[in-house]
Amino acid sequence: MRRLLNGFYTGCGVLSGLALVGIVACVLLQIGARAAGVVVSWTAEIAGYSMAASSFLGLAYTLNTGGHIRVALLLDRLPPAAQRWVERGCLAIASLVSGYFCWWTCAMVWDSWQFNEMGQGVIAIPLWIPQLWMALGVLALWVSLIDSLVCHLIDESTLYPRGGDQPSTV
């Protein structure tokens, strides 16, 4: 199961990176087109969709590699036993919030597909396509938070299932 979950998180991270490559491709296309005197008006729209996909798809991968920044002003001042319980509470609350967000994001994708909503840009793109990447990213984050909570409950020393470094703290 661990290999499957880590593969899922890594796959989302790879898709996030590919979306970043898509942004770069759009920018380079726009620069080249402008130099050639050609107007390519749809690149900003595609770059925007790619940015949303990259942001959401990278959340779970970043969480499981310990890349999120944490504000640990209070946590560092607690005794170790209290730190464990605060971590568990934070993971539980984050799991609930992300699960709620996941539910409504998937409902939004379903509604967009059902009502055949189209983007308002130059290219008529069905909105469920870019929204689907957002929903997949939120789903991956939700699974990742539950995974982290379960791992933390089983082994108190494991906060990040992939064995990533501790996140940078502020």
Image (cartoon, rainbow, N blue to C red):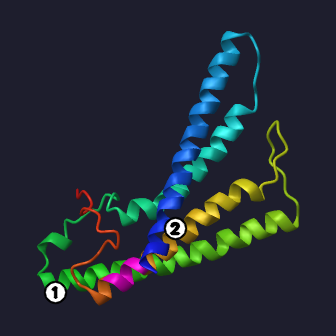
Q: Residues within 10 Å of mark 2 (few under 14, many from 20)?
A: some
Mark number for residue 8? 2
Q: Percent position (x, y) of residue 144?
A: 45, 73
- Give the residue drawn at x 29%, y 75%: 159
Q: Percent position (x, y) of residue 30?
A: 66, 23
Question: For the C terminus, which image quadrant?
Answer: bottom left
Q: Percent position (x, y) of residue 50?
A: 62, 45
In the drawing, does residue 101 fall left or right of residue 113? left
Q: Which corner quadrant of the image does residue 61 belong to?
A: bottom left
Nearest-to-viewer mark from 2 and 1 = 2
Q: Which corner quadrant of the image does residue 68 belong to?
A: bottom left
Q: Which residue is mark 1?
A: 81
Q: Nearer the viewer, residue 12 or 166?
A: 12
Q: Which corner quadrant of the image does residue 91 belong to?
A: bottom left
Mark number for residue 93? none
- Give the residue drawn at x 69%, y 58%: 131
The residues colored magenta run 147-151
Spatial CA distance of label 2 from label 1 is 32 Å
Task: Give the amino acid type for the residue marked by disc 1 in the picture.
Answer: Ala
Residue that sits furthest to the bottom in the current view: 154
Residue 135, placed above or below residue 1: above
In the drawing, does residue 153 fall left or right of residue 3? left
Residue 169, placed above or below residue 103: above
Residue that sits furthest to the right in the current view: 115
Task: Give the amino acid type for the residue marked by disc 2 in the picture.
Answer: Phe
Q: Percent position (x, y) of residue 22?
A: 61, 39
Q: Residues within 10 Å of mark 1 (few under 14, many from 20)?
A: few
Q: Nearer the viewer, residue 70 or 23?
A: 23
Instruction: Confirm or deny contact between disc 2 and disc 1 (CB under 8 A).
Output: no
